Image (tube, rainbow, N blue to C red):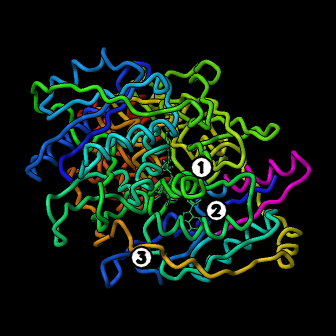
Amino acid sequence: MKIVVAIKQVPERDAPIRIAADGRWIEEGDLNYTINEPDAYALEEALQLKEKQGAGEVIVVSAGPERVQSTLREALAKGADRAIHIECDDLGSRDTLGVAQTLAEAIKAESPDLILTGLQSDDLGLGQTGVVLAELLGIPHATIIMHIEPADGSLKVKRELEDGWFQHVEMPVPALLTIQSGGNKLRYATLMGIKKAKTKELKTVPAAVAAASPAVALERVYLPEKQKKTEMLTGSPQEIAAKIVEKLKFEVRAI
Amino acid sequence: MSGVLVVVEQRGGAWNRMSFETLAAGQQLAAKLGTGCSAAVLAASAASLLPELSSKKLQKVFAVEHDLLAQYTADVYVASLEQLIRREQAAFVLFPHTYQVRDYAPALATRFKQVLISDVIAFRASGDSGSPVFVRQLMQGKLNADYHQTGAGPCFVSIQAGTFHADTLEPGNAPTETFTPQLAADQIRTKPGEPFRESSQTVDLSAAPVIVSVGRGIGEQDNLPVVEELAQALGAELAASRPICDNGWLPMERQVGSSGQTVSPKLYVAVGISGAIQHLIGMKGSKSVLAINKDENAPIFEIADYGVVGDLFEIVPELTKAVRAAKGSA
Ligand SMILES: Cc1cc2nc3c(=O)[nH]c(=O)nc-3n(C[C@H](O)[C@H](O)[C@H](O)COP(=O)(O)OP(=O)(O)OC[C@H]3O[C@@H](n4cnc5c(N)ncnc54)[C@H](O)[C@@H]3O)c2cc1C
Ligand SMILES: Nc1ncnc2c1ncn2[C@@H]1O[C@H](COP(=O)(O)O)[C@@H](O)[C@H]1O
């Protein structure tokens, strides 16, 4: 099976949040970047599918500025066969449709059997690029997927529902799935893998010119205003512990 | 184009209660825009659901009915709603931000060359652009952003759980209309199975009066005894955020949140948990919340009654000791 995994590079989770001068994003100079967490699970699922079948190819694709190449290299080191970097310096000014269009252009040329994305990005949290991509490519999709069982020309997937419920869904290939975290244990890149990655193909292609002006626009970003009055307990760890015990005893009555 | 259309959600004849929060949002948006709010429910037969809907102040309730809507598939939902929205020329289409909506609403918006503004927590009637401004969260709730629609066409918006309140819904007496979409069985590309649960749950967190819940701040599995000891001292059940269960450090049945258990203990102690919305959904009914987190901007403090900004590895062991001492002397 030929599998494409769409990977987004995002700021690390404990990134410092300072609003940029133009008020539309945060200071990028402060940031370190990593792979979007659900995308790491999507990659893992793809690698395990290939290993189980003993054949196939895993291609990782990312749209973004030059820095995303480091995340693509890491995916190669974990076992992806090749990588496509869609060079795109104006990612922030594209809406979901614009991003999905550039991904669709690059992926179409590969005619994969299966496309995996993460279910949601940690930075923008849109939760929709995968579904829009499937719609643009005219292929069936399913979202919030924990596990994939391939059969002849079709797939059976385990989809997460709310409150601890699940459901199986069957569909023909080619198809697109958005992957939820936790379906597999993530692997680390081995030294051998890192060495091999250097010889693997990482192709850079230009982003397709946006087909239309964006349908939605981000006006400004700002820190949320605190609504709730939280009683902050301060002091040395011992003092804090004593204060908490007081609260638990006399206010919460949990001790 | 005019009017607000709210697409409510049911499964097998039972409501997803977020539908009513979204209806409240729809009424408020319509009032701000000086227009009307309607609702649409999709089902093979919606008859049993209509009385509750039409008891709200709505311009119209659409029963979108077809045998092929008996079970949810993205393909028939997108096709049905595309037809209804084109006919009704709705200016705004609102959805509850449920797992089902995540599955089809982005594709529906794409049919109209629009982009869903997802997981919205608030709106203002008019910004600089003249069109309503929708607020959504970025960076896992640490940043807010104002969005507006720039395209021409229906504006698709999904509403975050718990941000609007069903008890603010205005009552009324709405007329209903049946809408029969043109659907064919061969449009459906996916075959959904019946919902199921994993092996029966042995841990029922919903009954626990005190819960100590651990998040990724714990760093590694070997550190878990730090919180286990606190739980023991407090006589509490141990729970966790999703990444802890994803990593297999604790079993899935101890996960709290939208895809785990929903709890409402007397005391919920959140240790090294950032407070992502999917976690908050599962525990915001707690009577009191104590949050211990080294990041003063962590969204968990937004719902905590008591907060400690600091390193859990310094605070929690001291707290365990103090709790033991207090209990010993009691
Ligand atoms: C569809 C969907 C469903 C989901 N369902 C769930 C669900 O049911 N339950 C759930 O929990 N999540 C769920 N999630 C995931 C959710 O979005 C978050 O990713 C997750 O809750 C984050 O877990 P966390 O707070 O433990 O980790 P993080 O967000 O990484 O937060 C770790 C926190 O620990 C703090 N910290 C680090 N070190 C220390 C220290 N030494 N001392 C004190 N504090 C420290 C940090 O400041 C940070 O705030 C779901 C996501 C999606 C998209
Ligand atoms: N710039 C990008 N490059 C590659 N994949 C992306 C990009 N943006 C989003 N994706 C994919 O789409 C998923 C959902 O992202 P989002 O819709 O932003 O929440 C991510 O998990 C990625 O798999």
Please give the residue where the numbered disc 1 appears in the rendered image: A178
Tag 1 near tag 2, CB within 8 Å? no
Please give the residue where the numbered disc 2 appears in the rendered image: A6
Is the CB of the residue bearing disc 1 within 8 angstroms of ligand 2?
yes
The tag earlier along the polypeptide, 3 or 2, is: 2
Question: What's the distance in space between the residues labelled 1 and 2, CA to CA?
Answer: 10 Å
Q: Give the answer, above or below, for where A173 lies relative to B330.
A: below
Magenta stretch: helix, strand or loop mostly: helix
Amino acid identity at mark 2: Ala
Q: Give the answer, above or below, for where A231 lies relative to B149.
A: above
Q: Is residue A249 visible?
A: no
Question: What's the distance in space between the residues labelled 3 and 2, CA to CA?
Answer: 19 Å
What residue sits 60% from the left and 68% below the top? A34
Amino acid identity at mark 3: Ser
Q: Residue A93's mark? A: 3
In this view of the protein, which residue sits in the foreground, B196 or B141?
Answer: B196
Amino acid identity at mark 1: Thr
Question: What's the distance in space between the residues labelled 3 and 1, CA to CA?
Answer: 24 Å
The tag earlier along the polypeptide, 1 or 2, is: 2
